[in-house]
């Protein structure tokens, strides 16, 4: 009973803050897709490419503005997440949110290619300190049986952001303003992140052993939970040997390949779903609303899929199945060019399959790397590799290849299927490793503390989630 009360108390404080932060983090990185087609309904004010990129007839300048975020995001993820272990979580995450919220708001002042590129680069720097740090932070409070669902709640807000962004864009395009409507979009979606950052500084709990949010008994229970099937650090420390272990772990690179495949689809969907829906014959006004249902369904599917994954304590097979669903969506877009209902259904497959796979793979690595330092290195490593797929996805749908976008759909389809195969290789590898350790060292007692201080996930009594 004490533990259940503690979990509810943690959920009440951690989940709302973390989920709202991710909602606006994802809005601020993906709202370019809405700005690309957002015109003033009442006064005909132009969308972003016409207003700030000289018309951009080929779509290439927009692609580079979109992908600029990912260059800095990729480069800064590993050092930022390792550094985050040396700073109180509430301070680190608060500064990150205030930083990216400021950058997003300043995008409204961009009047040319250089200005927009600069704000997107700094947006990536600040968000690099947030995304990979959250799975590490969650692993301090939640066990492996609870992580999948919590990560689904958190990452599901990326899908909520897609739905919410479409509604906000629909409302803003009807406003009568003295400036272009897309500029108000960046202001409306940037300022809340700054406010949330300030709130995070005061209300987000720090590490279990130091947070004032828990009383003495609750801290004891939280620390015991943190040491089930693994062992946590005490205080702000970094184990240098575990950093090098992460760089030598082939599974992190394989996870990066899976994440690459999924992020190629995710980034292209976020930036180009309004453009893709416009090829189905919808008006610019209706396109913003038509982006909402695919994201809303994806938010439900990711929670359901992650709950099943937690119950079965299986990650690889659910990832493979969800990735294949996304692949089927792209196959429909490739081979059914005229049936609008089928093509719209395909967008549901893509969003649901891709978002579910990403949520589960983050939860997979949040446990399977063993020590905190290896997690702080390995999680941003596979995410950084994966975000290279976001750069590719940002260049797959140039205006000149519409309305069929055969190359973009084919590449995303192939990557989703390849990601599913890699997930199967990973789960087989983990199963064989667990079986080998059981044979050599016996079956460990369930939920017993495992000393990972020296060997991380290679400790004889450590067992992987499959």
Image: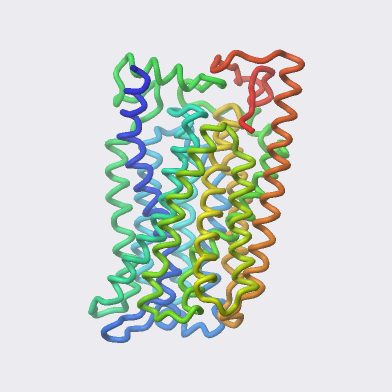
| Image x and y of residue 387, in percent | 58, 54
The residue depicted at 51 percent of the width and 52 percent of the height is: 355
**Where on the picture, by quarter, is residue 165?**
bottom left
Name the quadrant of the N terminus: top left
Render colour scheme? rainbow
Whether residue 448 is visible, yes or no, is yes
| Image x and y of residue 159, in percent | 43, 55
| Image x and y of residue 27, in percent | 40, 59
Whether residue 130 is visible, yes or no, is no
**Where on the picture, by quarter, is residue 87?**
top left
In the picture, measured across the screen, residue 144 lies left or right of residue 254, that is left
The residue depicted at 31 percent of the width and 39 percent of the height is: 201
Name the quadrant of the C terminus: top right
The residue depicted at 67 percent of the width and 15 percent of the height is: 443
Counting every numbered tag in the picture gives: 0
453 and 437: which one is in front?
437
Q: Is residue 427 above or below residue 67?
A: above
Q: Is residue 266 above or below residue 2?
A: below
366 and 74: which one is in front?
366
In the picture, measured across the screen, residue 386 lies left or right of residue 46, that is right
The residue depicted at 24 percent of the width and 76 percent of the height is: 175
In the picture, measured across the screen, residue 191 lies left or right of residue 264, that is left
| Image x and y of residue 46, in percent | 37, 83
């Amino acid at each position: 009973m004490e533990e259940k009360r503690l979990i509810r108390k943690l959920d009440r404080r951690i989940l709302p803050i973390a989920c709202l932060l991710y909602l606006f983090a994802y809005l601020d990185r993906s709202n370019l897709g809405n700005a690309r087609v957002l015109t003033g309904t009442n006064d005909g004010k132009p969308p972003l490419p016409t207003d700030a990129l000289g018309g951009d007839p080929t779509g290439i300048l927009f692609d580079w503005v979109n992908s600029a975020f990912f260059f800095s995001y990729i480069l800064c993820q590993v050092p930022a997440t390792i550094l985050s272990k040396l700073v109180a979580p509430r301070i680190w995450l608060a500064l990150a949110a205030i930083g990216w919220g400021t950058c997003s708001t300043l995008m409204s002042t961009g009047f040319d290619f250089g200005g927009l590129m600069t704000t997107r680069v700094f947006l990536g720097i600040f968000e690099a300190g947030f995304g990979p740090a959250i799975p590490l932070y969650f692993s301090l409070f939640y066990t492996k049986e609870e992580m999948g669902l919590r990560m689904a709640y958190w990452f599901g807000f990326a899908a909520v952001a897609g739905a919410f962004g479409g509604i906000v864009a629909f409302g803003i395009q009807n406003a009568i303003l003295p400036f272009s409507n897309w500029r108000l979009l960046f202001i409306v979606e940037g300022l809340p992140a700054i406010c949330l950052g300030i709130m995070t500084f005061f209300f987000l709990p720090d590490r279990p052993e130091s947070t004032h949010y828990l009383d003495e008994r609750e801290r004891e229970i939280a620390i015991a939970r943190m040491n089930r099937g693994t062992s946590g650090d005490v205080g702000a420390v970094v184990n240098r040997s575990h950093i090098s272990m992460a760089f030598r772990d082939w599974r992190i690179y394989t996870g990066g390949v899976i994440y690459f495949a999924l992020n190629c689809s995710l980034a292209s969907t976020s930036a180009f779903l309004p453009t893709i829906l416009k090829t189905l014959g919808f008006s610019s006004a209706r396109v913003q609303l038509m982006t909402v249902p695919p994201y809303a369904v994806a938010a439900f599917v990711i929670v359901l899929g992650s709950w099943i994954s937690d119950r079965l304590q299986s990650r690889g097979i659910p990832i493979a199945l969800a990735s294949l669903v996304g692949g089927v969506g792209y196959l429909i877009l490739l081979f059914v060019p005229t049936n609008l209902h089928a093509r719209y259904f395909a967008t549901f497959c893509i969003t649901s399959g891709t978002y579910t796979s990403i949520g589960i793979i983050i939860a997979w690595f949040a446990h399977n790397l063993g020590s905190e330092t290896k997690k702080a290195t390995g999680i941003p490593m596979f995410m950084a590799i994966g975000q290279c797929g976001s750069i590719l996805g940002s260049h797959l749908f140039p205006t000149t290849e519409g309305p069929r976008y055969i190359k973009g759909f084919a590449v995303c389809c192939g990557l989703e299927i390849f990601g599913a195969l890699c997930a199967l290789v990973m789960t087989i590898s983990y199963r064989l490793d667990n079986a080998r350790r059981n044979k050599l060292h016996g079956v460990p007692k369930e939920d017993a503390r495992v000393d990972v201080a020296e060997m991380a996930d290679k400790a004889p009594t450590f067992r992987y989630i499959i």
